[in-house]
Amino acid sequence: MGSSEERLLESLTSRYSEWIMEALGDLSHDLNFLITDPCIAGHPIVFASRGFLTMSGFSREEVVGRNGRIFQGPETDRRSVMEIREAIREERTMQISLLNYRKDGTPHWILFRLYPVFGRDDGRVVHFVAVQVPIPRRRSSSGRQVARGGSLTFGACRNEVRSDLEFRCCLPFDSYDGSDNRGLKGEEMREAGDSEKQKAIDGAAEILSKLMQYSKLAGRVVCGKRPSPQPGVSHISSSLGTSLGRIKQSFVFFSCRTDPHLFDMPIVYASDAFLSLTGYARDEVLGRNCRFLGGPRTDVDALKQINESILAEKACTVRILNYRKDGTSFWNLLHISPVRNSTGKIAFYVGVQVDEGAKNDVHGLSPAVRQLGAVGAVKVAVRSLSSCAGSSSRSSS
Amino acid sequence: MLTIKRVPTVLSNYQEDAAGCGRNCLGDCCLPLSKLPLYAFRNNKPLATAAASQVDLPADFLLNTLLLGQWEDRMSQGLFRYDVTACETKVIPGGHGFIAQLNEGRHLKKRPTEFRVDRVLQPFDPSKFNFTKVGQEEVLFRFEAGEDDSSRFFESASVDESVPPNVVAINVSPIEYGHVLLIPRVLESLPQRIDPESFLLALHMAHEAGSPYFRLGYNSLGAFATINHLHFQAYYLAMPFSVEKAPTKRIHINEELAKNGVKISKLLNYPVRGLVYEGGNNLKDLSDVVAQSCICLQENNIPFNVLISDCGGRIFLFPQSYAEKQALGEVSQELLDTQVNPAVWEISGHMVLKRRNDYDDASEEYAWRLLAEVSLSRERFEEVESYIFEAIGVLKPEKYETETKVKEEASFQPPVAGPPTYPEGCLVIQ
């Protein structure tokens, strides 16, 4: 547990220096916001403001490390949830009225404003910030009577508290004023007014400016707008990188030989598991050809077989002796497969490494199935992300 | 008798040549003696639906890894008719985000077969192709309820006579990566007909996958199912479908359903009229309401398609009439020429096109026009809706109906150029 907590803390301190926690704590107390890290598996919350904790009733420990979906409940609109998911996938700003749940199970309407924070050096999203402004109950302009106080809890209880409230959940809904609301169970949509919208925008700007300021101290500057891509830095779009980050296997992407600048098929992406398997740091492998994993006893025939299948644009599996950074060797059951983008052309090759000694996982899945599962997940991610309108890797045709 | 002619899609390599068994098939002769990989899903307590669930989803989804891994393995064995990842795909410009794919390999240059489209329920015909004739190499795994607290995979498990096997097999003509068929109780030779148990099984599969990009679909006979042997389809597409983005309007439901947490809405601003079911305190409550609705349509001989989305938490039901219109000669030649059969995936916004020029010219206006032909008319939809509500015990207040009629009618007009209309409060800043 300790190391995962450290990783959550490092997510902020490595980008914004050691002083960021204090700086965020100094922001106005009624500014409710969360910061999440899409690069960590499960896209967890890495920071929750004091205002947010007061509003939601959760403690910091109950929130940090969890995914933002823990605040959703039975009456949260699924389509709104999907819109948030798509904004995250497309890495854009969005704003929506959302019904969230407090720790005690009571729902409350908020104006939810989400925006990405980009690293200026590589253009990748490093964090998302979610500002949440409570929307007070008010008479809507259409003259509809909004459900009265207390009724908001009906049919809207979190699992943990549902049993206690079962009786209340079963109450007939006739207890509302006005027949328009019959059956709508008090989750009547609340519109954000101009003051909430302004508050969300101002709050978002305030947080961003703090993050930018402190990122300079750490030497890894962030910005709120997607920086224009620098040529040759990476051929992996940031959204793709984020999706790939969720795949737990050891794998690398290397570019195709058809690209004249990349004739030596350099590595353009390396997963965390690859780095821990081989002992190298990310910047030691990006841009290099995979042959550095070979060593004195590596079989030349295996290398030839790999080259032949790449020339034939086919997948292959070879057993090859590889060397870690510390010089120790391991038998790698390497699977290499072409990966096509949305135009149907080969965009990359993926190489998935499996240490020959690997065992079935706790669920009973063999290393071979997990290896091919990673290939499949990579293919799905590359294929769909590259067809997104506006995606940076969209084909120019 | 109403019929249409169409070239059947080849779902299995054994479909063309369904000769006698001399191999490992899924029929009575082979399956009971076989060992197959088994995925046993957690089933010992009522499962909360995605909407009601507060637990974090596992970071490494077991079913996804298994399904993708097995599918990739069959791909390396060369069991598919083409590499679907080599098919071009794009999002059609416009606010609805219809997705088009150019798939020139899916459709055989074969003689069209006659399909009867005026009977939603037809008896199982063992002489025709069915999934018991599929070879076992096309099976990825069995999908059964397990006894443990968590889901588990067994690389090889004997088919137990007391548990009728459900199998997940590849579709050899995939329309996206991971395209599979879920065949409930394959040995029982069930016709294409929804029953509560099978529908719940399909929902379990969506729930186990835990990915909003893995959806299941169902086509009834008369709504472009080609094989009269009970099956659901599923595949991965890591983008939202147009129908998932469409706004909806909640329908007032009765206490009994509300107590189960099930919510029913109507689609707005979408070319095909349909109902959306979501929520539910557990999977079974939600499943039962949808299954009852489907059964009602079956009994009233109304063809329909079903999309299971959002990890089993959101289900779209579309009664449709395209095949009937086609049989009656009411569909324009221009639409027929594209040879797109509007089944569940097309209706949901994923258009598979067979001709290069159709793909290049694909526009939102075309997609809308095609799908508008699928939809029931407003009058007919309301009639069908009232059958469904009667079947599931929902009373519709008259007031609500008259009040929203005008608004709804306006929302079914074809799109005009410009941004899509979002419901109030759903401001999306691009």
Image (cartoon, coloured by chain):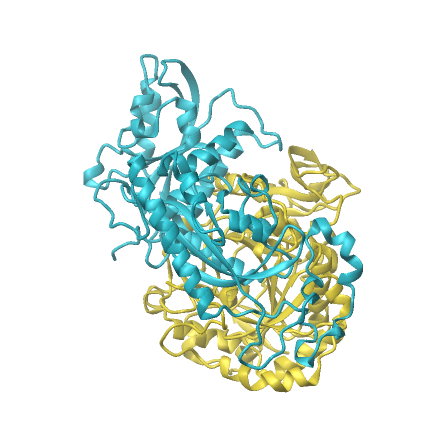
Chain colours: A cyan, B yellow
Any part of residue B175 in sight: no
Q: Seen in the image, is B391 located left or right of residue A231?
A: right
Name above or below for residue B55 compared with residue B247.
above
Quadrant including the C terminus of chain A: bottom left
Quadrant including the N terminus of chain A: top right
Identify the residue shown where x is 37% and y is 15%. Answer: A326
Identify the residue shown where x is 59% and y is 43%. Answer: A59
Identify the residue shown where x is 34% and y is 30%. Answer: A282
Percent across and percent down for residue A339 are 37, 42
Determine the residue located farthest toward the left in the rendered image: A260
Which image quadrant is residue B276 in?
bottom right
Percent across and percent down for residue A218 are 32, 35
Q: Seen in the image, is B120 located left or right of residue A384?
A: right
Closer to the camera, B247 or A64? Answer: A64
Closer to the camera, A369 or A266? Answer: A266
Closer to the camera, A114 or B353? Answer: A114
Percent across and percent down for residue A12 are 41, 38
Closer to the camera, B357 or B18? Answer: B357
Identify the residue shown where x is 68% and y is 47%. Answer: B166
Percent across and percent down for residue B255 are 77, 69
Any part of residue A18 in sight: yes
